[in-house]
Image (cartoon, grey):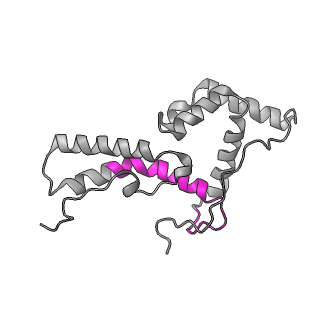
């Protein structure tokens, strides 16, 4: 056996999350639970990586992709922008701004960001109404321009995303 043959990585060791979004512990804990479940099904260590990593990636990819998309707002971020980013980034910013005006929407966003609930679980009538109400208020100019949401600090160097050299 090679000394690293039975070494497994999970959480931030396998997928590098930007600590700004505070998801590393949730990802690590959930990946540990997935590892536990995979081992309960079959304790064969030789096949463990090929059984564990696809299941862990299925969970970990969406939060990673969402936060990587948020990092794409910085011009020095290296990597190809997804085709949908010109639409999804402004929509995300709009919903984040709307959260400043509605407590229930704000709580729903925190639950999604911190992986307490899946995004589609949050599409309640109350959340949809909060976004619609904010849209109507913005369209009628009944709200002052929102300048209170501080931008996340710009990274000091280049961010390297997987697949970029």
> Which of the 4 quarters of the picture holds residue 46?
bottom left
From the viewer's perspective, tell me whether residue 138 is left or right of residue 53. Answer: right
In the rendered image, is residue 84 in sight? no
Residue 132 x/y as whole percent: 72, 31
- Give the residue at x 48% y 54%: 17
From the viewer's perspective, tell me whether residue 154 is left or right of residue 5. Answer: right
Residue 56 x/y as whole percent: 34, 49
- Dividing the image into 4 quarters, which one contains the N terminus? bottom left
In the displayed orientation, state which residue is furthest to the bottom. 165
Q: Which residues are magenta?
A: 56-81
Which is nearer the eye, 26 or 144? 26
In the displayed orientation, state which residue is furthest to the top. 126
Which is nearer the eye, 141 or 97? 97
Location of residue 12 with respect to 111 vertically, above or below: below
Which is nearer the eye, 85 or 108? 108
Principal SS element in the magenta part?
helix
* Magenta span contains residue 29: no
- Give the residue at x 61% y 60%: 72
> Which of the 4 quarters of the picture holds residue 68?
bottom right
* Magenta span contains residue 69: yes
Location of residue 46 with respect to 148 vertically, above or below: below
Count of marks overlaid on the render: 0
Residue 65 x/y as whole percent: 50, 54
Location of residue 113 with respect to 45 vertically, above or below: above
In the rendered image, is residue 146 in sight? yes
């Amino acid at each position: 056996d090679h000394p690293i043959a039975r070494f497994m990585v999970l959480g931030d060791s396998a997928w590098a999350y930007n600590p700004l979004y505070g998801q590393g512990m949730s990802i690590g804990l959930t990946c540990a639970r997935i590892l536990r479940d995979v081992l309960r099904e079959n304790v064969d260590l030789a096949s463990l990586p090929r059984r564990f990593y696809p299941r862990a990636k299925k969970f970990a990819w969406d939060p990673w992709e969402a936060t990587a998309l948020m990092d794409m707002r910085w011009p020095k971020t290296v990597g190809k922008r997804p085709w949908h980013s010109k639409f999804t980034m402004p929509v995300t910013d709009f919903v984040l701004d709307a959260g400043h005006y509605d407590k229930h929407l704000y709580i729903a966003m925190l639950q999604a960001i911190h992986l307490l609930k899946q995004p589609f679980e949050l599409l309640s009538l109350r959340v949809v109404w909060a976004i619609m109400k904010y849209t109507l208020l913005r369209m009628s100019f009944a709200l002052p321009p929102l300048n209170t949401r501080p931008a996340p600090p710009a990274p000091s160097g280049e961010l390297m995303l997987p697949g970029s050299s």
